[in-house]
Amino acid sequence: MRNLSKWDFFALLKAEFIRSPLHHNLENKRFKVLALIVYFVSMFSLLSQAQPAKAQAVARNIKERKLEVGDTIPKELWELSLQTVNHPSGKKNILLQDFQKKLIILDFWATWCGSCISAFPKTKMIEKQFSENLRIIPITTQDQKLVSKFMANNDLIKDNKIWSIVNAKEMEKYFTIHTLPHYVWIFDNKVVSFSTSNALTIPFIEKFLSRSEKAWVEKVALDKRLPFIESIKNFGKTSFYYEGKVEGAGKSFGIYPYQKDLTNYYFTNQTKHEIISWFIAKLRKDIPIDKIHITAPNIAIDTEEWQKFIKEPTTTQLIVPKTEDLQSVFDDWLKLARINVLSVEERNVTISIIK
């Protein structure tokens, strides 16, 4: 049976109604119209009953998906009762909504994570400086008994009067955490960032609180079970480098804008010699691309390595911040290709190929 649209379905109903005994038995035209309306309304109400189920399925998908940057914090997370240890006010449980008007940074840690624990004095100092507008909340999925014993015996935690949410396995429904420490920034009812401890600095937090400006680099949720490119697809700077011909990709190069703040530089099936020539011609507009002469004093021109350099195709893509200048993009590509540019003199480029 083929799928029918709503309107196809109604047309079919009308045809069936006209062929039905009910239609032929109704001689009065006004009664025929009324019967037709009743017939349609009845069938439409049956169809509409299916819509809530579909809406519920969509809602379930959203609910089951982990939160990402830009997502709204769901009401049930704000109201989730969270168990604590060493709370300064002696509270056994807290709600995130107690701090809803502040910038909240959830500091995911564990007793076995040395870098998490060594960062506590820094986070404590930062929270104290921005006490009116910021709350940094340590949080672990480990149980209360284990964490209490650990805290009671750790001098750094005792000296800094660190407290923590514990038994927070429920949080795994909302956040993807591959490495610790992991910091989740929440502000204005939304997830605004996932970061490492490098983002927790006074200048970064000042900029965010005063201008809502994110000056730090987002943490990459690197899932080691998948190709890394799957994890870094939304990262601020990504690269792809492949030596050998990519069949069917053609031979081309170019620059495209990518998303709002990024630029995409690509070279498909171009030799290293050709890519260097392209960059030099762009950077030194006084040197025509067909006049650029490239030498490599560390390899002989009759060797297989030199022939590979001037003949073997490579495919590269560099996605970088729009603000990055062309020289920096060239430097990024040279690192990928393992090449040093020693000098650019008039029309001669001297390079060194890293073995």
Image: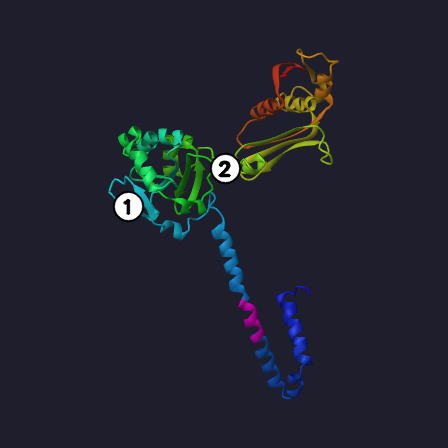
Left-right relation of 343 to 61:
right
Name the residue tied to disc 2: 221
> Residue 180: where, in percent of width, then height?
43, 34
Looking at the figure, which quarter contains the C terminus?
top right
> Which mark is in front, 1 or 2?
1
Q: Nearer the viewer, residue 132 or 127?
A: 127
Real-space Cα distance between discs 1 and 2? 32 Å
- Residue 92 numbered tag: 1
Mark 2 residue crowding within 10 angstroms, few (<14) / some (14–19) / many (20+): some
State which region is magenta.
42-49
For mark 1, give the secondary structure: loop
Marking on residue 141: none
Residue drawn 71% across and 11% down? Answer: 300
Kind of residue at badge 2: Ala
Q: Residue at x 73, y 36 (%)?
A: 248
Q: Is residue 134 visible?
A: no
